[in-house]
């Protein structure tokens, strides 16, 4: 019987899973997701060769209605498809670890309670992560569960990078900049050590550009600053999230425009970003194909903010040796990568247009002082690596 590690990544409307062999190679055995939870759910699993091993869809209003039910459904499907493989550990992506949890941890009742207490800091994400933990405890009683945090990679920041200019007592109450996408950044830092070892010890900005988007300044493999702050709403504009905004705008909406907290949350998290600017879509592929004035302006703003943050993070690093593009847009949009890099020769960036168009790993021109790379990220594998480490401890 082959031992396996199950990775669970519970998002706002979907749950991704991947099953890995529990050995040093961590071969992927199964992967898939259940999406459109609460609407018209669909569950799909495929094996390592890409063959479908489970495919189930429910009509509108039927099937799993919440994350707990969806997790039970996909967990049971994985157990059936796993055959003789025995799940010996479950690793979870947990968005928020707060100030104290700076590394992956084995989940026990005290840790479960600590994670629940952090829900006010990530109200749109943490409850789904907790639902995943509870559902897997029901499906696999007694099996070790591990929490891997999106915030942990950033816990070594200097205080000036993590504080707001508020009275000092607020910092002690947890109102500080946490940073997110840490699992992705940790994976990219690990990959750099393998594909560009000279760069791995230098000053690198990683641009995690997807439906959620952020950037991270890394020196010697460690995060020193990030564009995301107290929540995953800050920094770059995203698919539906606003990114950085003058807090005075929020006060104006509350006091003058009739918004309450619920309406403001809806606006900033779901109706803004590329979707709000374009009036069309949150999907970069749709915007690039549309070529309307509004879509072009939305892409232009997205690129402008990336370039602005790149300069700021380079300043925080005291210079720049490398720039890495990753995640859905970063990995797949040659046009966005080109727009970010064009005219950045003052920073030492020179792009190889052909290498960029082909989507090669190194896309900077020969002689470019700053090396530019395109590296796929793999948060699920990073979770599996950390879970295996704790399993073998």
Image: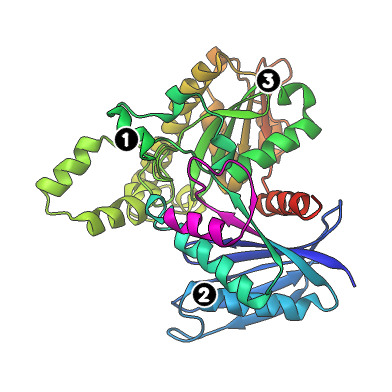
Report the Cα–Cα distance between label 3 and label 2.
43 Å
Residue at figure coordinates x 47%, y 54% from the top left: 283
The secondary structure type at the circle numbered 3 is: loop
Tell me the magenta residue range: 91-117
Q: CA distance from mark 3 to mark 1?
A: 34 Å
Tell me the residue that label 2 is attached to.
Answer: 68
**Is 218 in front, or is 312?**
218
Q: Nearer the viewer, mark 3 or mark 1?
A: 1
Q: Is residue 104 above or below residue 40?
A: above
x and y, in percent, of residue 161 in the image: 45, 26
Question: In this view, which residue lies farthest toward the front?
Answer: 110
Label 3 Cα crowd, 10 Å radius (few <14 / some 14-19 / many 20+) = some
Which mark sits nearer the N-terminus, 3 or 2? 2
Whether residue 161 is visible to the viewer of this picture, yes or no, is: yes
Task: Give the x, y percent position of residue 63.
Answer: 51, 85
Examine the image and state in which quarter residue 330 appears. top right
Is 221 magenta? The answer is: no
Q: Which residue is mark 3?
A: 202
> Residue at left 79%, top 26%?
197
Q: Dot 2, crowdedness within 10 Å: few (<14), some or many (≥20)?
A: some
Which residue is disc 1 drawn over? 170
For residue 63, above or below residue 214: below
The one of 298 and 205 positioned closer to us in this rendering? 205
Q: Quadrant of the N terminus?
A: bottom right
């Amino acid at each position: 019987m082959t031992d396996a590690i199950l990775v669970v990544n519970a998002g706002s409307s979907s749950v991704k899973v991947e099953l890995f062999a529990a050995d040093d190679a961590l071969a992927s055995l199964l992967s898939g997701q259940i999406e459109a939870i609460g609407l018209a759910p669909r569950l799909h699993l495929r094996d390592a060769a890409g063959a479908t091993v489970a495919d189930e869809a429910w009509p509108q209003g039927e099937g799993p209605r919440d994350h707990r039910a969806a997790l039970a459904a996909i967990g049971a499907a994985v157990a059936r498809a796993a055959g003789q493989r025995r799940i010996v550990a479950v690793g979870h992506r947990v968005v928020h670890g707060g100030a104290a949890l700076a590394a992956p941890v084995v989940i026990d009742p005290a840790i479960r309670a600590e994670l629940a207490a952090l829900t006010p800091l990530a109200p749109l994400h943490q409850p789904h992560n907790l639902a995943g933990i509870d559902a897997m405890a029901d499906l696999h009683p007694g099996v070790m569960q591990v929490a891997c945090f999106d915030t942990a990679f950033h816990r070594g920041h200097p205080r000036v990078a993590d504080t707001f200019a508020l009275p000092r007592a607020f910092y002690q109450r947890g109102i500080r900049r946490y940073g997110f996408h840490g699992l992705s950044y940790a994976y990219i830092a690990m990959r750099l050590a393998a594909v560009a070892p000279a760069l791995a010890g230098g000053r690198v900005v990683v641009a995690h550009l997807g439906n959620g988007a952020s950037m991270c300044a890394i020196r010697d493999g460690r995060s020193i600053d990030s564009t995301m702050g107290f929540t995953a709403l800050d920094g770059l504009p995203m698919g539906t999230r606003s990114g950085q905004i003058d807090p005075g705008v929020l006060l104006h909406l509350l006091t003058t425009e009739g918004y309450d907290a619920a309406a403001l949350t809806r606006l900033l998290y779901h109706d803004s970003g590329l979707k709000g600017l374009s009036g069309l879509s949150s999907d970069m592929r749709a915007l690039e194909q549309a070529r309307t004035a509004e879509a072009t302006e939305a892409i232009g703003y997205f690129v402008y903010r990336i370039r602005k943050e790149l300069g700021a993070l380079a300043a925080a690093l005291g210079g720049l040796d490398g720039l890495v593009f990753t995640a859905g847009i970063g990995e797949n949009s040659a046009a966005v990568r080109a727009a970010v890099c064009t005219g950045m020769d003052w920073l030492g960036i020179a792009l190889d247009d052909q290498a960029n168009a082909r989507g090669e790993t190194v896309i900077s021109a020969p002689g470019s002082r700053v090396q530019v790379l395109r590296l796929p990220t793999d948060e699920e594998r990073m979770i599996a690596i950390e879970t295996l480490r704790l399993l073998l401890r």
